[in-house]
Amino acid sequence: MRTSAALALLASSLMVLAKVALAEPKPMPADAREYIIWPSDGQVVHGGKFWVRMGLSGAGVAPAGVDRPNTGHHHLLVDVGLPPMDEPIPNDKNHLHFGRGQTEAQLELPPGRHTIQLLLGDDQHVPQAPPLYSKKISVVVTP
């Protein structure tokens, strides 16, 4: 009896995941734009900690899990390229999620040259259509 209940729960979970995986990207206005307000490209920051200010125009910011038309939340890509646009954005040290709807965050990076880029994700962390991402910029961190 326990085995059949566990299998039924597993099957149900897999069906929900399949629906999410096959979901169409959510539409965004063609004029919407994702951008980094600060730092600027080539900015030198001292001490490793600095604020990143995130901008979005032509669309709105909403927390993860909130499904509203023409909204999403920011993801900051650090030292990586853009992920697949038809899958949820990874969540690791190179793909930082701001699922509470934050528009600024303190970032700490080791000394050296780094790249940062914003990517907007929908309520399920999947890029919209068309995907909204900022220009990739370089930041130089000094001790």
Image: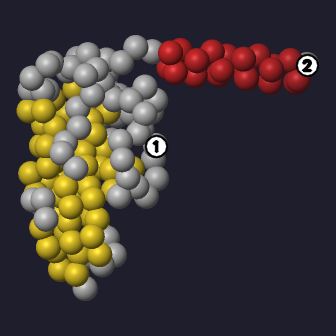
First in residue order: circle 2 vs circle 1 = 2
Q: Residue at x 67, y 16 (%)?
A: 12
Q: Relative to the observer, which residue lies in front, 65 or 116?
A: 116
Q: Is residue 6 left or right of residue 113?
A: right
* Quarter of the rendering containing residue 131: top left
- Image quadrant for the N terminus? top right
Mark 2 crowd level (few <14, some 14–19, many ≥20, 10 Å Cα) = few
Q: Amino acid at mark 2?
A: Met
Q: Relative to the observer, which residue lies in front, 28 or 124?
A: 28
- Image quadrant for the C terminus? bottom left
Q: Amino acid at mark 1?
A: Pro
Cα–Cα span, label 2 and label 1: 37 Å
Would you place residue 136 above or below residue 88 in this image? Answer: below
Q: Is residue 38 visible?
A: yes
Would you place residue 137 above or below residue 21 in this image? Answer: below
Image x and y of residue 118, in percent? 25, 45
Q: What residue is shown with label 2? A: 1
Q: What residue is shown with label 1? A: 90
Disc 1 secondary structure class: loop
Image x and y of residue 142, in percent? 22, 81
